[in-house]
Image: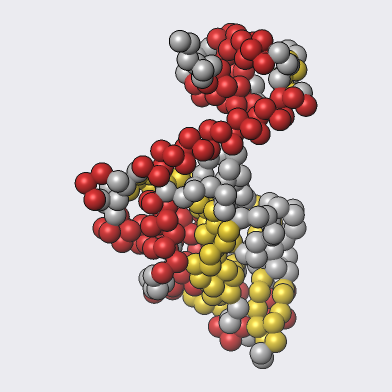
Amino acid sequence: MSRRFDHLGDVETFVTVVEKGSLTAGAVALATTPSVLSRAITRLETRLGVQLLRRTTRRLSLTEQGQLYLAQSRAAFALIDDAERAMQGQQDGELTGSVRMSVPTTYAHHRLPALLQRFAAHCPQVRVELNITNRNVDLVAEGYDLAIRLGQLPDSGLVARKLEDAPMCLIAAPGYIARAGAPERIDALARHACLPFVMPSTGRVSPWILRDEGRDVDWTPQGCLQVSDDVLGVVSLALSGLGICQTYDFIAHDLVAQGRAVEVLPQARGRSRPFSVIYAPHRRLSSASRALIDFLTAGERA
């Protein structure tokens, strides 16, 4: 009796090549050669009796049948992945398994380490695969279990559980304040070197969220130095004495305590930005993923 699914390796090859964008990149991911992958896709197309990919010397593109088969193949592999995850944590009564999580740089460097240290003490057999990026990853297509996101989330069909509302503040280096003086009002910021951050999603400068005598104020900084992609860059520039930046209290607290930064316009604080953990509702979360979500959303933030 022949095996019904002995072609699954060819299906995985097809999915990998599409996700990586080329035979060459797919070959690197699967540790093989482009010619081997090309033959695998040809075998799969012959088996199905349809063309899945249009291949030229410069690019690959999916046919209509290829788009349909890709979606259904991903769904099938997700079910297999879910079945394996459901088995994780079943041995010896101790929670095991792995969690793939994507986190922005601010949270990953300044908030998550202490949380993960405590989580590891509770669940020492769970492996957390941490991707640190400010890019909004595609959880399903890229195989992530969870992601931490900043701000109000669009209606994407993902489940979001709030972690915290993180208060914001303005800081500068002591050397900058000694040289330029400290602004006493929000409108005085226009006469200072401010460090704007350009949001990758819009290409626009992110406004500073302030409060003036109980009134919310969105103030857009202007400056000769602008930072994009990694918002921690404005903090590094501010600590070097190049100007004033807005950042989170959880970043500024230790810097101020160490004397490396001073708070600017403390009377203008009082607003915050939300952080949430998100996941796809249709994927069956592993016990390890559920445990990490519950841990992140339950604890008090220092």
Q: Is residue 106 left or right of residue 92?
A: right
Measured from the top left, where is residue 257 in percent x and y? 39, 74
**The N terminus is located in which quarter?**
top left
Where in the figure is residue 264, as x and y percent of width and height? 56, 78
Where is the C terminus found, in terms of image quarters? bottom left
Point 57% across, 68% down: residue = 274
Q: Residue at x 67, y 91 (%)?
A: 213
| Residue shown at 67% from the left, 55% from the top | 156
In the rendering, at what x and y percent does residue 272 appear? Answer: 58, 74
Residue 132 shown left or right of residue 207 in the figure: left
What is the quadrant of residue 119 in the picture?
bottom left
Q: Observer-nearest residue: 104 or 71?
A: 71
Q: Looking at the image, which residue is at 74% across and 54% down? A: 202
Instruction: Name the image quarter holding residue 70.
Output: top right
The residue positioned farthest toward the bottom in the image shown: 213
Q: Pick out the residue farthest to the front.
A: 1
- Judged left or right of residue 166, residue 291 is left
In the depicted structure, whether residue 190 falls above or below residue 4? below
Q: Is residue 295 visible?
A: yes
Residue 137: image location, x then y, percent: 59, 46
Residue 272 vertical position relative to residue 292 in the rendered view, above or below: below
Residue sitting nearer the eye, 237 or 90: 90
Lateral position of residue 10 relative to residue 96, left or right: right
In front here: 206 or 191?
Answer: 206
In the image shown, does 264 or 280 lie closer to the viewer? 280
Q: Is there any visible trace of residue 265 in the rendered image?
A: no
